[in-house]
Image: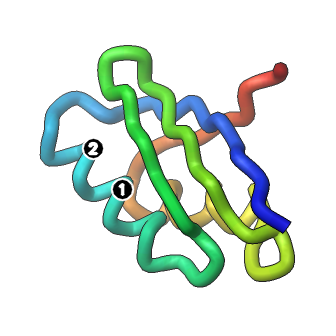
Amino acid sequence: MLETARIRIKGMTCKGCEGTVKKALLTKNGVREVYINRDEGIASVTYDSAQTDIATLHQVILRKGYFPSAIEE
């Protein structure tokens, strides 16, 4: 089942940072689409919940040196 998560990411300061996070997320199995708004520090990630989960997405971001947190909706 496809879900979309909004993740606040601290530490993205440039287009290169944005690209690093996006590329890392897109290489994870189950991730279908990633949109990043660097100015707001938010990533919108569409993923298959049968293949991955929010905790795993957060770990991918952390491994790249950025600091993710969930956005309450």
Residue 7: which numbered mark, if any? none
Q: CA distance from mark 1 to mark 2?
A: 6 Å
- Is there a contact, CB below 8 Å, between mark 1 and mark 2? yes
Q: Nearer the viewer, residue 70 or 31?
A: 31
Q: Residue at x 43, y 78 (%)?
A: 27
Identify whether 37 is placed above or below 19.
above
The image quadrant of residue 37 is top left
Q: Residue at x 32, y 27 (%)?
A: 38
To which residue does mark 2 refer?
Answer: 18
| Residue 32 position within the rendered picture, expressed as x and y whole percent measured from the top left | 55, 66
Answer few, some or many: residues within 10 Å of disc 1's Cα (few below 14, many 20 plus, some between 14 and 19). Answer: some
Left or right of 15 on screen, residue 35: right
Q: Secondary structure at mark 1?
A: helix
Quadrant position of the N terminus in the picture? bottom right
| Residue 5 position within the rendered picture, expressed as x and y whole percent measured from the top left | 70, 43
| Residue 35 position within the rendered picture, expressed as x and y whole percent measured from the top left | 42, 42
Hey, what amino acid is under mark 1? Answer: Lys
Q: Nearer the viewer, residue 66 or 70?
A: 70
Quadrant position of the C terminus in the picture? top right
Answer few, some or many: residues within 10 Å of disc 2's Cα (few below 14, many 20 plus, some between 14 and 19). Answer: some
To which residue does mark 1 refer?
Answer: 22
Identify whether 19 is placed above or below 37.
below
| Residue 3 position within the rendered picture, expressed as x and y whole percent measured from the top left | 77, 53
Identify whether 43 is placed above or below 62.
above
Identify whether 53 is placed above or below 27.
above
